[in-house]
Image (spheres, grey):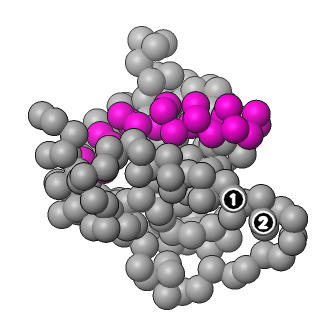
Amino acid sequence: MEINKYIEMAKKGDQVAFTYLLDHYWNEVYGFMLKRTENETDSEDITIETFSKAFDKIATYNPEFQFNTWLIAIAKNVHIDMLRKKRSTVFVEITDEEDQQAYNVADSSPSAEDELITEQNLSRLLQFIKELKPHYQEVIQLRYFQEMSYQEIAEQLNEPLSNVKIKLLRAKKLLAAIIESKR
């Protein structure tokens, strides 16, 4: 299936299409930002926010341009915004309205990653989770061990709901890869 089909499906809110696009373009966007920032944490934060914004505004995507070009443009803007915020050190509160507009990426039906994660016994699972970066450990901990909703996690972390959803998608993907590699 060509990329444009996934983009069209994502425009209709298809969870599988969102996950496919995230997986397909993550390394390209992350690698681009890593070259620019030379900082893994910043690159990861920028990439998470890039996908969050892209999925939020996917209806505005113009297919005359390459999807990766569009994502890179968003990433550059997120990076510029981040630099401005660092300079001004003023933190703007995220409004409830923005949270309400956050796209509905989270699907209630368990994904293949969810099933793989729940199959593991607790002590092994905790070992695998320790291999994730701290901010991924945190969202997995809040979601699966404290059984918080996405909204509760967003409030706890003081982050937009859409960022929390992207972080969880990514954390589950990385955790599933760790589990697969240890089988």
| Relative horizontal placement of residue 181, taking residue 82 as reference (left or right) | left
Residue visible at 17% across and 55% down?
A: 8
In the displayed structure, would residue 15 be above or below residue 153? above
Residue 4: horizontal and vertical position, in percent? Answer: 18, 45
Can residue 96 be seen from the camera position used here?
Answer: yes
Under tag 1, what secondary structure?
helix
Report which residue position mark 2 lands on. 84
Screen quadrant of the C terminus: top left
> Is residue 148 covered in magenta?
no
Packing grade of label 2 (10 A; few <14, some 14-19, many >=20) is: few
Can residue 108 be seen from the camera position used here?
Answer: no
> Is residue 27 covered in magenta?
yes
Screen quadrant of the N terminus: top left
In the displayed structure, would residue 41 be above or below residue 81? above
Magenta-colored span? 17-39
Residue type at the position of mark 1:
Ile
Residue type at the position of mark 2:
Arg
Residue 83, located in which quarter of the rendered image? Answer: bottom right
Under tag 2, what secondary structure?
helix
Residue visible at 24% across and 53% down?
A: 63
Q: Main secondary structure of the magenta part?
A: helix
Find residue 112 and name its label. none
Task: Say if mark 1 contacts mark 2, CB within 8 Å.
Answer: yes
Residue 75: horizontal and vertical position, in percent? Answer: 56, 51
| Relative horizontal placement of residue 44, taking residue 8 as reference (left or right) | right
Report which residue position mark 1 lands on. 80
Residue 113: horizontal and vertical position, in percent? Answer: 36, 36
- In three-dimensional space, the C-alpha distance between marks 1 and 2, rounded to whole angstroms, equals 6 Å
Residue 128, located in which quarter of the rendered image? Answer: top right
